Amino acid sequence: MNNPSTHAASSSLNTEGIGTMITLQLDGVVLARGMRVLQRGLSHSMSAGQITRLRGPNGSGKSTLLRVIAGRLRPAAGAIICQAPRLYIGHADALASARSGRDNLSDWARLNGFDATPDHIAASLQMMSAAGFADIPARQLSRGQRRRVALARLLLGPPDALWLLDEPNAGLDGPASVRLDDLISRHLDGGGMVIAATHLPLAPTHKGSDLVLADPQ
């Protein structure tokens, strides 16, 4: 159940999802970059099993909002309450270039306090069709291969996590995008949540809702 955003953004109401308890609440959030205000009065709520597609023109603050929800930036004003673990994958893949994909996943799990066994890591890479290049240094991988490794990290987290994804399909070919849709659908069916900045019909079998950010002109 999503509250309509005021002033700078709007959100369509959706009741689809397996949960009814509000797990994420944005209340009057203001986004700013330096001295420039990007959005005012953003309000939105989500429950387990729901997806929100974050839309808006370039420069409207989509990436900033994802980082604010992830706790990496502070909002200029307003409140954010999140009762789920938050996993953020930005538009930059953030892989250690000299480390293999497998090692990158192991390092990421350790830094985030996740108990990821070698078998779990191997399965995560396999599910994103990244097993074939898992032991190659990240600097030698193509853009799409790096993206698949980065997204495989999500599968090491808890099933009730909120996935915060910035243009998750960037660099992915058709089959990899289909695989991502499937993984997102499974995550939602298992009680997870997703907020994704994307112009694509991500996980189309789940209607979800749109949070549309206005041009901050």
Image (cartoon, helix red, strand yellow):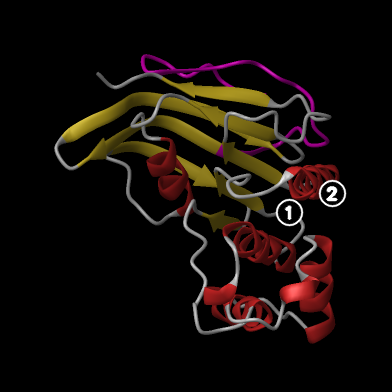
Q: Give residue 57's position: percent from left, percent from top.
A: 41, 24
In the image, taking residue 194 as reference, residue 216 lies left or right, namely left
Q: Quadrant of residue 30?
A: top left
Residue 174 in the image: state x and y as whole percent. Answer: 76, 42
Task: Name above or below for residue 1 compared with residue 102.
Answer: above
Name which residue lies at 36% across and 14% down.
7
Nearer to me, 3 or 217: 217
Foreground residue, 71 or 103?
103
> Going by the image, does 97 lie left or right of 129?
left
**Residue 93 placement (x, y as % from top left):** 52, 61
Coordinates of residue 22 in the picture (x, y in percent): 65, 36
The amino acid sitting under disc 2 is: Gly
The amino acid pointed to by label 1 is Asp
Asked if the residue at tag 1 contacts the one at tag 2, i.e. Cβ–Cβ closer than 8 Å, the answer is: yes
| Residue 178, placed above or below residue 92 | above
Label 1 SS:
loop
Magenta stretch: helix, strand or loop mostly: loop
Which residue is labeled 2 in the image?
A: 190
Quadrant location of the C terminus in the rendered image = top left
Q: What stretch is highlighted in magenta?
A: 1-24
**The stretch drawn in magenta includes residue 8:** yes
What is the CA distance from the residue labelled 2 to the residue labelled 1? Answer: 7 Å
Left or right: where 186 falls relative to 63: right
Residue positioned 79% across, 30% down in the render: 206
The residue labelled by disc 1 is 160
Is residue 151 magenta-colored? no
Q: In the shown orientation, is residue 105 left or right of residue 29?
A: right
Q: Quadrant of the N terminus?
A: top right
Q: In the image shown, does 212 or 175 lie closer to the viewer?
A: 175
User: What element does badge 2 sit on?
Assistant: loop
